[in-house]
Image: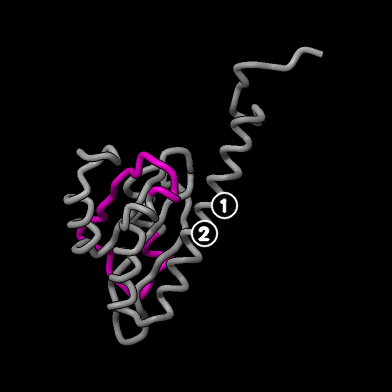
């Protein structure tokens, strides 16, 4: 464990070797999907996807997203316990981007950035909702009139 609360060496190894990777973020129902498989027609994929209810559901959704690929032997996953900005500052987002670019070319950098930006925006909205005591949140303090 280090300052981020996870084993960064292990996470880096997973990013560098996994065919299919899911990154879960602490307060988001959305996930980052990274599929590094390529063929003559399709390059790698990076996308923000819904949380799956089960492993089987994740495999089905992946097959729907990537119909020209057989199901992977396994889908690797890890939980990032901090904010998206911290994920970026840790170097892990860049590590993912670099791997995607090495497999699919420079346009993958923009796709990865778009996915990270979407996650950051969703996270910001979720934090604001939590602060305001929105649906599924309860405020700890309320202003008295």
Q: Is residue 73 magenta?
A: yes
Quadrant (top left/top right/bottom left/bottom right) for the C terminus: top right
Q: Which residue is mark 2?
A: 117
Towards the viewer: 117 or 39: 117
Q: What residue is at 64 percent from the left and 16 percent from the top? A: 141
Judged from the image, the secondary structure of the residue bearing numbered disc 2 is helix
Towards the viewer: 59 or 141: 141
Return the residue found at the far top: 144
Q: Is residue 69 magenta?
A: yes
Residue 57 falls left or right of residue 141? left
Task: Report x, y in % for residue 26.
Answer: 41, 39
Q: Is residue 102 above or below residue 113?
A: below
Alpha carbons under labels 1 and 2: distance apart: 6 Å
Towards the viewer: 71 or 32: 32
Q: What residue is at 33 percent from the left and 49 percent from the top? A: 56
Q: What residue is at 62 percent from the left and 37 percent from the top? A: 128
Query: Dot 1, crowdedness within 10 Å: few (<14), some or many (≥20)?
Result: few
Return the residue found at the far bottom: 40
Q: Is residue 98 above or below residue 76?
A: below
Task: Report x, y in % for residue 114.
Answer: 50, 65
Q: Which residues are magenta?
A: 62-86
Q: Which residue is mark 1?
A: 121
Res 135 → quadrant: top right
Q: Is residue 120 above or below residue 16?
A: above
Give yes or no for contact between labels 1 and 2 (Cβ–Cβ under 8 Å). Answer: yes
Quadrant (top left/top right/bottom left/bottom right) for the N terminus: top left
């Amino acid at each position: 464990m280090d300052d981020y609360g996870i084993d960064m060496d292990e996470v880096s190894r997973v990013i560098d070797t996994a065919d299919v990777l899911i990154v879960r973020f602490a307060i988001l129902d959305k996930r980052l999907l990274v599929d590094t498989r390529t063929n003559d027609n399709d390059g790698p994929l990076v996308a923000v996807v819904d949380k799956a209810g089960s492993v089987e559901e994740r495999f089905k959704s992946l097959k729907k997203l990537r119909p020209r690929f057989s199901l992977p032997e396994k889908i690797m996953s890890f939980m990032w316990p901090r904010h998206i900005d911290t994920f970026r500052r840790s170097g892990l987002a860049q590590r993912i981007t670099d791997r995607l670019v090495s497999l699919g070319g420079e346009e993958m950098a923009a796709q990865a950035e778009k996915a990270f930006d979407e996650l950051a925006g969703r996270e910001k909205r979720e934090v604001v909702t939590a602060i305001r005591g929105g649906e599924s949140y309860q405020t700890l303090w309320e202003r008295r009139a």
